[in-house]
Amino acid sequence: MTGQALVLFSGGQDSATCLAWALDRFERVETIGFDYGQRHKVELTCRAVFRNRIVAAFPHWAAKLGEDHTLPLEALGAVSDTALTRDTAIAMGANGLPTTFVPGRNLIFVTFAAALAYRRGLKHLVVGVCETDYSGYPDCRDDTLKALQVALNLGMESRFVVHTPLMWRDKAATWALAESLGGAALVEAVLEDTHSCYLGDRSQRHAWGYGCGTCPACELRRKGWEAWRAAG
Ligand code: ZN
């Protein structure tokens, strides 16, 4: 596929796999990350490390990898009172949403990404959201992203295409996708240089990567890894 893309790249497993997916398809790929006062900056640190590894280990992708943009979004942290931005326990809230839910986060991220993509002439937006592994996040739903694509194109008089390659893939399938895109070297890069743990723990290296091993994000990552290994 030709064209130029902007990948919403947080430094986690999903968005890292999406970055590889985009590099496999598009002529040029830029990345964007957001600093919204998340309790742990580990993910943001992982972004540069993962990008550097892509450049070093995948020369055919390195030639396509363009600029990285980091946008400060403290305002999002300021209006959010969730487990990711405050020292609140990670649990299920009374409204059925986990306390890790930052209201409207993906709506805001994709909208800012589109504004940047507009300025830089990038048609394709790539977002690593997923409906399959139940997270309870309504802004990860397929309908939400499709509605947002329509709203952005109307509001900016443009023809953005919002890609969500992981929408119907579970975590095991996401590992399989990484392997099909970049083989063992990409799987190793995702294991070593991405971060999922809500607690920001990188003191323990498990078979499935770094993390506390018990938070919901670690549990999801571990189960996905084990299911993928068992299937292979
Ligand atoms: Zn964890």
Image (cartoon, grey):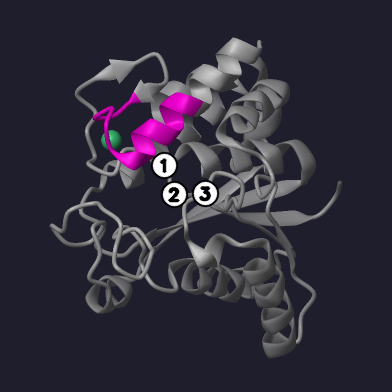
- Looking at the image, which is closer to me, 24 or 200? 200
Q: Is residue 229 magenta?
A: no
- Looking at the image, which is closer to me, 93 or 141? 93
User: Badge 1: few (under 14), some or many (20 or more) residues near its Cα, within 10 Å?
Assistant: many
User: Badge 2: few (under 14), some or many (20 or more) residues near its Cα, within 10 Å?
Assistant: many
Task: Kindly report which numbered mark, 2 or 3, lies closer to the viewer in this rendering.
Answer: 3
Q: For the point 44% across and 31% down, which residue is it? A: 221
In terms of secondary structure, where does tag 3 sit?
Answer: loop
- The residue beneath circle 2 is 10
Q: Is residue 143 left or right of residue 112?
A: right
Residue range in magenta is 210-223
- The residue beneath circle 3 is 134
- Image position, residue 207 (x, y; %): 40, 13
Whether residue 158 is situated above or below residue 175 in the rendered picture: below
Disc 3 residue type (three-letter): Tyr
Q: For the point 31% across and 38% down, which residue is it? A: 197
Q: Ligand 1 is found in which quarter of the picture?
A: top left
Give the quadrant of the C terminus: top right
Disc 2 residue type (three-letter): Ser
Q: CA distance from mark 2 to mark 3?
A: 19 Å
Task: Kindly report which numbered mark, 1 or 2, lies closer to the viewer in this rendering.
Answer: 2
- The residue beneath circle 1 is 47
Whether residue 228 is situated above or below residue 1 in the rendered picture: above
Whether residue 69 is situated above or below residue 44 in the rendered picture: below
Q: For the point 38% across and 64% down, which residue is it? A: 96
Instruction: State yes or no: discs 1 and 2 in contact (Cβ < 8 Å).
Output: yes
- Image position, residue 218 (x, y; %): 35, 33
Task: Kindly report which numbered mark, 3 or 1, lies closer to the viewer in this rendering.
Answer: 3
Q: Is residue 49 left or right of residue 180?
A: left
Q: Is residue 200 left or right of residue 169?
A: left
User: Quick one: label 2 or label 3, which is nearer the N terminus?
Assistant: 2
User: Quick one: label 3 or label 1, which is nearer the N terminus?
Assistant: 1
